[in-house]
């Protein structure tokens, strides 16, 4: 999972770098004009982060906490199945 997140971050940074070069070198735009063209991407990212990080239903958070407490009580062989309960 971390590898996927890392590759996603790398591709996003690479895209931003080349888009800035394209706008400033090829289209001859100023840095401010380039920033204005990339601003909607930033705003959309912030909005998506807020929407995706809030729980869809408040009772889901309580269920998640209950599962965590139940897992703390498990010992030995049963603890190996924790990943399947998520």
Image (cartoon, rainbow, N blue to C red):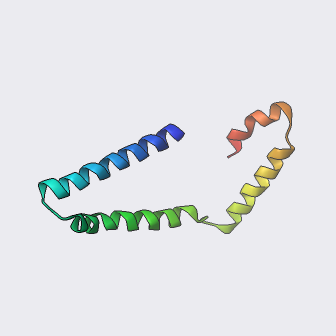
* Residue closer to the observer: 42 or 83: 42
The N terminus lies in quadrant:
top right
Q: Is residue 56 left or right of residue 25?
A: right
Position of 39 relative to 66 (above/below) = below
User: In the rendered image, is residue 31 in sight?
Assistant: yes
- Where is residue 38 drawn, in percent x and y? 30, 63
Residue at image position (42%, 45%) is 8
Residue 33 x/y as whole percent: 22, 68
Residue at image location 42% in from the left, 40% down from the top = 7
Note whether 63 is above or below 85 in the view shown. below
**Which x, y percent locates residue 43?**
39, 68
Q: What's the residue at 19%, 58% (across, down)?
A: 23
Residue 33 appears left or right of 80: left
Quick check: 20 above or below 59?
above
Q: From the viewer's perspective, is 6 left or right of 66?
A: left
Q: Check the image and name the residue furthest to the top.
A: 77
Q: Is residue 1 visible?
A: no
Q: Which residue corresponds to the image point at 80% horizontal and 45% vertical from the top-left?
A: 71
Location of residue 58 (image quadrant): bottom right
Total tally of numbered discs in the picture: 0
Q: Quadrant of residue 65?
A: bottom right
| Left or right: residue 9 compared with residue 39 | right
């Amino acid at each position: 999972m971390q590898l996927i997140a890392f590759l996603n971050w790398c591709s996003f940074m690479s895209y931003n770098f080349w888009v800035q070069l394209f706008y400033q070198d090829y289209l001859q735009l100023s840095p401010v004009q380039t920033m204005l063209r990339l601003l909607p991407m930033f705003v959309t990212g912030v909005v998506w982060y807020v929407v995706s990080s809030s729980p869809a239903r408040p009772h889901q958070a309580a269920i998640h906490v209950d599962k965590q407490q139940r897992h703390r009580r498990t010992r030995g062989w049963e603890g190996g199945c924790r990943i399947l309960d998520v």
